[in-house]
Amino acid sequence: EAQVTQNPRYLITVTGKKLTVTCSQNMNHEYMSWYRQDPGLGLRQIYYSMNVEVTDKGDVPEGYKVSRKEKRNFPLILESPSPNQTSLYFCASSPSEGARGYTFGSGTRLTVV
Amino acid sequence: AQSVTQLDSQVPVFEEAPVELRCNYSSSVSVYLFWYVQYPNQGLQLLLKYLSGSTLVKGINGFEAEFNKSQTSFHLRKPSVHISDTAEYFCAVRRTSYDKVIFGPGTSLSVIP
């Protein structure tokens, strides 16, 4: 089944403790992206990647890191999480042909206390 | 710069009644247009998309949308809603293949039995 897999689905952590949210897609998509979803603010792009070893900042990159060492994986790293990073995170992928739209993962609900 | 406006943040509607969710966008160039649906505790799922050609686009679950270039609108409609249509609906635009998808703030559709 074609899908984007995120792990974990739920995560509670403490301020300052490094964490990684994994994202993997099995569709050979070139483009991958991370969004965060917050009430009243909608979906905001954090980082994106157009292909292996090519990443760039989105609208809200502060406090996050990403890497794209393999085409299928695009982990999101929070080096020192803070409470304002409490949010619902989505990974999405699409082929280079943009008209196909995104395929989304199921989301990761992160709480930083 | 592109932007997407969804005029109604919440739309309550009785079961089997018709519904229209409004979306307006601004862009100086041609764009791809999308509607996504987010069911509770799930990721976003593509409902339908407009690329070019016929302005009336049909999607999954009986939804359709009409592209109006002069009004820069892409309203979503369904002639008869079901309880299972209760969800958050997002309108989105994408300029080119590698461009990011810009989402509207979302419309929460509540179907009342």
Image: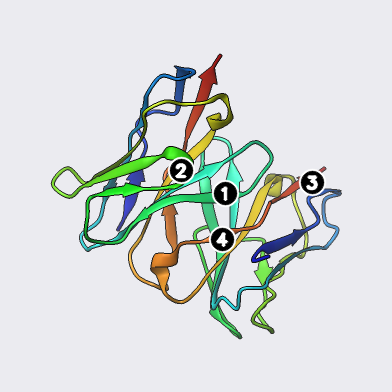
**Amino acid type, mark 3:** Val
- How far apart marks 1 and 3 lie (CA) works out to 24 Å
Determine which residue is flagged by label 4: A103
Amino acid type assigned to the residue bearing label 4 in the image: Thr
Q: Is residue A50 left or right of residue A90?
A: left
Way the structure is coloured: rainbow
Q: Residue at x 22, y 63 (%)?
A: B29
Query: Mark 2 or mark 4: which is in front?
Result: 4
Decide: few, some or many residues near mark 4? Use Cα within 10 Å; few <14, some 14-19, many ≥20. many
Badge 3: chain ID: A
Q: Mark 1: which amino acid?
A: Leu
Where is residue A14 shown, x and y percent of the image? 86, 49
Quick check: A56 left or right of A70?
left
Circle on res. A112: 3
Cβ–Cβ under 8 Å for marks 4 and 1: no
The residue pinned by badge 1 equals: B44
Q: Label 2: which residue?
A: B90
Q: Quadrant of residue B87?
A: top right
Front of the two marks 3 and 2: 2
Badge 3 and badge 2 in a common chain: no
Q: CA distance from mark 2 to mark 4?
A: 14 Å
| SS label for mark 2 | strand
* Nearer-N-terminus badge (1/2): 1
Specify the subunit that label 1 lies on: B
Residue located at (38% from left, 54% from top): B49
> Does the rendering let one see residue B99?
no
- Tell me which amino acid carries mark 2: Phe
